[in-house]
Amino acid sequence: MVLFGLVLRFYKAWTLQFSSDSDHGIVMLMAMMVCGVGAVYLACKLANRSRNGEGGGLGAYLLLGLLAGLGWWSNQLVVAFLLTTALILLMGVSWRMIREGTLPVLCAFFVGSAPFWIWNISHEWGTFDFREALGRLPLHVGLPAFYHTFLTITELESLRF
């Protein structure tokens, strides 16, 4: 719970910084929050079941993937919740859980986030372009520029490959 509280604390600061620039609006941010919290909650339940030697059940895996997908579609800031979800599942992981859950979670994720992917395919991957930053660069030029800027800002220049 402490880890989840820390993620929420950082998430709040992150959202306040970027939500005014977002075109999704407050409704999409709230949808993302509901999906993200739901995914974290469900991950806790699945990890607990795994620790007790029980299976998660296909429905739980599908719901987890669907929540993650809907959260991704509504706003990509859901990544903070999805990373927390992944960390919780990794701490409570069993091979049975991986065997039973990976495919249903991934399939449900892509079903839930389908509108996001369909829009991007039909709009030349516009979500991933750096049109509002870094001099309006296309993705293939903007990604390396973003990486270099990130290394410079965080002073991680020595990690460059």
Image (tube, grey):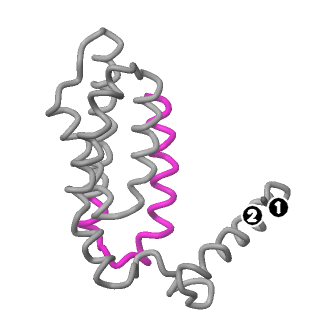
Identify residue for label 2. 151
Mark 1 surroundings within 10 Å by alpha-carbon count, few (fewer than 14), some (14 through 19), many (20 or more)? few
Q: Is residue 38 above or below residue 90?
A: below
Q: Residue furthest top?
A: 52
Q: Position of residue 126 (x, y in %)?
A: 40, 81
Residue shown at 78%/67% (left/top)? 152
Instruction: Report the quarter where the N terminus lies.
Output: top left
Which secondary structure lies at badge 2?
helix
Q: Is residue 50 above or below residue 31?
A: above
Q: Is residue 73 above or below residue 39?
A: below
Mark 2 surroundings within 10 Å by alpha-carbon count, few (fewer than 14), some (14 through 19), many (20 or more)? some
Magenta stretch holds residue 5: yes
Residue shown at 47%/70% (left/top)? 18
Identify residue for label 1. 157
Q: Position of residue 93 (x, y in %)?
A: 41, 22
Say whether residue 38 is visible.
no
Quadrant of the rendered image containing residue 40 = top left
Marks 1 and 2: CB-CB under 8 Å? yes
Work out how far the residue at label 1 is from the one at label 2, CA to CA, in angstroms: 5 Å
Residue shown at 28%/17% (left/top)? 49
- What amino acid type is highlighted by mark number 1? Glu
Which secondary structure lies at badge 1?
helix
Quadrant of the rendered image containing residue 158 = bottom right
Quadrant of the rendered image containing residue 157 = bottom right
Mark toward the start of the polypeptide (1 vs 2):
2
- What amino acid type is highlighted by mark number 2? Leu
**Relative to residue 151, is residue 85 drawn left or right?**
left
Q: Position of residue 133 (x, y in %)?
A: 57, 83
Magenta stretch holds residue 22: yes
Q: Position of residue 83 (x, y in %)?
A: 46, 44
Residue shown at 54%/86% (left/top)? 138
Specify the segment rendered in magenta.
1-30
